[in-house]
Image (cartoon, helix red, strand yellow):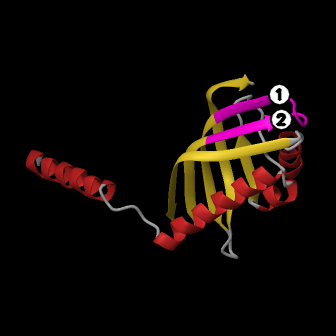
Amino acid sequence: MKNHFIVLATLSVLALATVGCAPPGGTDSDVAGVQAWSDAMLAAQTAGDVDASMKLLTDDAVGMPPDGTILGDADTWRAYWENLYSGDSLEAALSDEEYQADGDWGFVSGTWTVSVAAEEGGELHRAAAYFVVIVHREDVGAWKLARVIWHPAQPATEE
């Protein structure tokens, strides 16, 4: 009986190890779709386009910013975008990105850097954040933000 238990335990460990070593799912076109979503969101942010940003969210999108508030409905998301885009100019960039997809779910992670001038010629405020965005492919095939969490990569600066 003891040998039977050892054999079962060994087979269970091997089965779990095999699953854990499986290649990542998703096709190149799935990953390209997630990357295209990321590019569209960055373009909407750089343009300060609230409506374009809203179209890139699922109906039940949740955002978890570092200040502890929860962005959980269309009104809070719209207010967030309007506040972010309220300055005279905004420049956003991504770096160290990773894109993955498996079926109808994917994620983007990396560093987001933003520079905002409150008014023309005003002080430039820069901030960077590490982020993870979970995206979902909807029935129509469009990838949209389902969940996002971020935290500062370094303290904000003024120039």
Q: Quadrant of residue 154?
A: top right
**Disc with the residue nearer the chain's start (1 vs 2):** 2
Q: Magenta stretch: residue 69 in it?
A: no
Residue 31, how many percent across, how many down?
Answer: 52, 65
- Whether residue 110 is situated above or below residue 56 in the rendered picture: above
Locate residue 139: give its quadrant.
bottom right
What percent of the width, then of the height, locates residue 35?
58, 61
56 horizontally vs 14: left or right: right
Q: Which residue is mark 2?
A: 117
Q: Is residue 7 left or right of residue 105?
A: left
The reply to whether discs 1 and 2 touch (Cβ–Cβ < 8 Å) is yes
Residue in the image at 89% along x and 48% along y: 75
The image quarter in which residue 22 lies = bottom left
Packing grade of label 2 (10 A; few <14, some 14-19, many >=20) is some
Q: Position of residue 68 (x, y in %)?
A: 73, 30
Q: Residue at x 64, y 57 (%)?
A: 38
Return the residue at label 1: 123
- Counting other residues with Cα less than 10 Å from the Cα at mark 1, is it few (<14), some (14-19), or many (20 or more)? few
**Residue stretch in magenta:** 112-128
Q: CA distance from mark 1 to mark 2?
A: 6 Å
Main SS, magenta residues: strand
